[in-house]
Image (cartoon, rainbow, N blue to C red):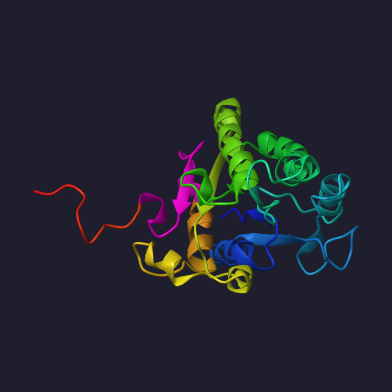
Amino acid sequence: MTVRTALVCGGTSGLGGGIALALRQQGVHVVSTSSRAPSKDSVVNDIVHLDFHDKASPAACAQALASSNIKPDILIVNGPGPAKGTTLSVSAEAWQESFDLLWAGPLALLGQLLPPMLERRWGRVIWVTSVSCVRFVPNLSVSTSLRAGLHGLLTTLSAEHASQGVTFNAVAPGYHATDRMKQLGVQQSVIDEIPVGRLGTPEEFGTTAAFLAREEAGYLTGQVLVCDGGWSHGKLSAKPVIQK
């Protein structure tokens, strides 16, 4: 069997860590990126440096992979959240920085890694976006706007490359029990709105994303899978709005 190689952005912890774990369990060779990697020029212990805040970093990351003869078949685009706030409360500078983080940086990396996938006629590109693209979440205007745009990008990329063996999909997470979520604190009222009655785990999210990377998922492209315990659809009310 062919052993696939994945580059998981932010794959050392959180949701990215869950994806990396699930891919390894599928027999995939996983290299994770970190802005705190021990070297900017090489891959050390399957970790490579990448910082989307640095415009030169995507090309340097690709070069480090090439120097180690690592050829990713799977790219997981995942990163830190952008600026928080309402549409007008976020400064123009913060909007631009967030665009660089969610769009310019990942596109630069994709520009480095996609052509070899097309040449090999096999690839999986999976974006981690947000459930706020399908249900309103306060103070996430920047994240929602930019990540919803990514869903449109995936549709375009899918149409452009569907016949070349590379698929493009996204997984939109809801509320998961990551370290960052624990730091922020999740109110019980939020959990009460989740139909399954609890937060998701990084492992559950990782399994969802890893499915899209499987050989058997080759007919899925241009799709957004929402992994949120049903939160985006709402919970059945104890008192029906429409009476019999």
Q: Is residue 127 visible?
A: yes
56 or 21, which lies in front? 56
Q: Quadrant of residue 29?
A: bottom right
The residue lying at 58 percent from left, 35 percent from top is 154
The residue closer to the viewer here, 26 or 109, is 109
Residue occupying the point 81% across, 53% down: 65
Outermost residue, front side: 89
Q: Nearer the viewer, residue 191 or 4?
A: 191
Q: Quadrant of residue 33?
A: bottom right
Give coordinates of residue 181: x percent, y percent. 59, 68
Of 196 and 126, nearer the camera is: 196
| Magenta stretch holds residue 225 | yes
Does residue 28 appear left or right of residue 66 in this picture?
Answer: left
Query: Is 145 placed above or below 84 here?
Result: above
| Left or right: 213 as drawn, with respect to 95 | left
Q: Give percent across and percent down for residue 242.
A: 17, 47
Image: magenta residue range: 212-233
- Furthest residue toward left: 244
Please state, as top left, top right, bottom left or bottom right, where the N terminus lies in the image. Answer: bottom right
Is 78 on the left-hand or right-hand side of 199?
Answer: right
**In the rendered image, which quarter is residue 102 located in?**
top right
Residue 214 visible somewhere in the drawing: no
